[in-house]
Amino acid sequence: MGELSIPIGKLARSVGCKVQTIRYYEQIGLLPPPVRTAGAQRRYGEAQRQKLSFIRHARELGFPLPAVRELLALSDEGDSDCAKADGIARRQLEAVNRRIAMLSSLRSELERMLHHRHGHRIRDCRVIATLADHALCSQDHHAERAES
Amino acid sequence: MGELSIPIGKLARSVGCKVQTIRYYEQIGLLPPPVRTAGAQRRYGEAQRQKLSFIRHARELGFPLPAVRELLALSDEGDSDCAKADGIARRQLEAVNRRIAMLSSLRSELERMLHHRHGHRIRDCRVIATLADHALCSQDHHAERAES
DNA sequence: CCTAAAACCTACAGCGACTGGAGCTTCAAG
DNA sequence: CTTGAAGCTCCAGTCGCTGTAGGTTTTAGG
């Protein structure tokens, strides 16, 4: 059914990523090296297309590559405990929630800056004044390193 | 009032960043080169501390460095139009809103994955199944390149 | 069979915004 | 004057790709 020898460009189009991204995944050992033509061009099969699709889907959900690697490994051995995959997903959900919370507080601070404007010259500008003086902030919006 | 010759480590502590970050800002021309001791160590004054604090605050609000550079330039010349600063802040607010929207849809997808679990073995795992088959998604969560 | 264009190849540099380390020198307190 | 903390420069690494240069292979049409 699935085509037996898909060239890299067609594969890239079919999963919605760039050709280089696929080669990159191969380079870091996320995708197995495919068969090559006599002229050394990559040719993929349906199984590899599905694997790549899995990877891309996980990446779109914000899973960092190490997590994707774990998820891939889990999906390969069907006897493992589902709890592991759940744990990874739960951690990702928590990370997403943290990022949303942080961005929400940034949003309200930015809105405050923008709505409380009074002067139209820089020296009276609320945006600049707020940046210059942290004490003008309502909440503390402390940045947290976010993956992905 | 302000100390007249702050060494880099104290400055870093006072604004909550790393020493290397300050040196990096100097390297890319965001902070002016400070005076040096006879032994070539950096010594900062209060004005530079305020400038750095401004930069850090803007960064915490997610402004990318080019935007920070613009905001700094605006704050230096008090006669400019406040509309420029407002525009930069508004664009940042829009970017934050876009990121929140994207993360919210990721969150609901992750929650769907986690709550509809049925098996406790990988082969019945909803998390893995969802990743493997994009068709199981309710919405399309298409990643958008986000700055910062 | 031949040609031309599209697609492929490798290798490496660059992005943003830092961060970490090696290997050395200088400063400040006691 | 000693000693240990803090400073210095230079360079490499992070993450997840993306872009480019300069060449080769494939494929469709004539």
Image (spheres, coloured by chain):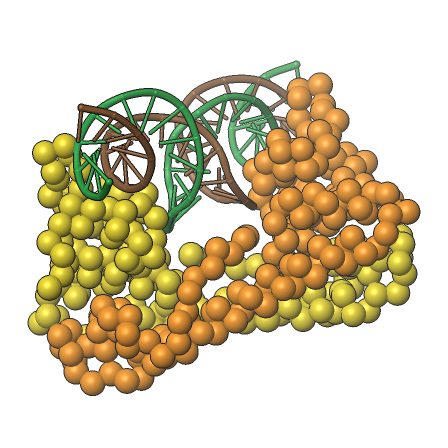
Chain colours: A orange, B yellow, C green, D brown
Q: Considering only vertical position in the picture, is A146 above or below A55?
A: below
Decide if residue B129 is in sight here: no
Taking B108 as reference, is B59 left or right?
A: left
Q: How far across and down, in percent of the image, does residue C25 sit?
A: 20, 25
Question: How many numbered discs sit on the rendered protein?
Answer: 0
At x 67%, y 33%, the residue is A29
At x 68%, y 53%, the residue is A58
At x 31%, y 64%, the residue is B57
Judging depth in this view, the residue of A137 and B138 nearest the camera is A137
Q: How far across and down, in percent of the image, does residue C24 sit?
A: 27, 21
Q: How far across and down, in percent of the image, does residue A129 sit?
A: 21, 73
Judging depth in this view, the residue of D8 and A125 nearest the camera is D8
Taking B113 as reference, is B51 left or right?
A: left
Q: How far across and down, in percent of the image, does residue A114 sit?
A: 31, 79
Decide if residue A76 is in sight here: yes
Q: Considering only vertical position in the picture, is A20 above or below B2?
A: above
Judging depth in this view, the residue of B68 and B55 nearest the camera is B55
At x 66%, y 21%, the residue is A40
Q: Quadrant of residue A139?
A: bottom left
Q: Quadrant of the N terminus of chain A?
A: top right
Taking A115 as reference, is B136 left or right?
A: right
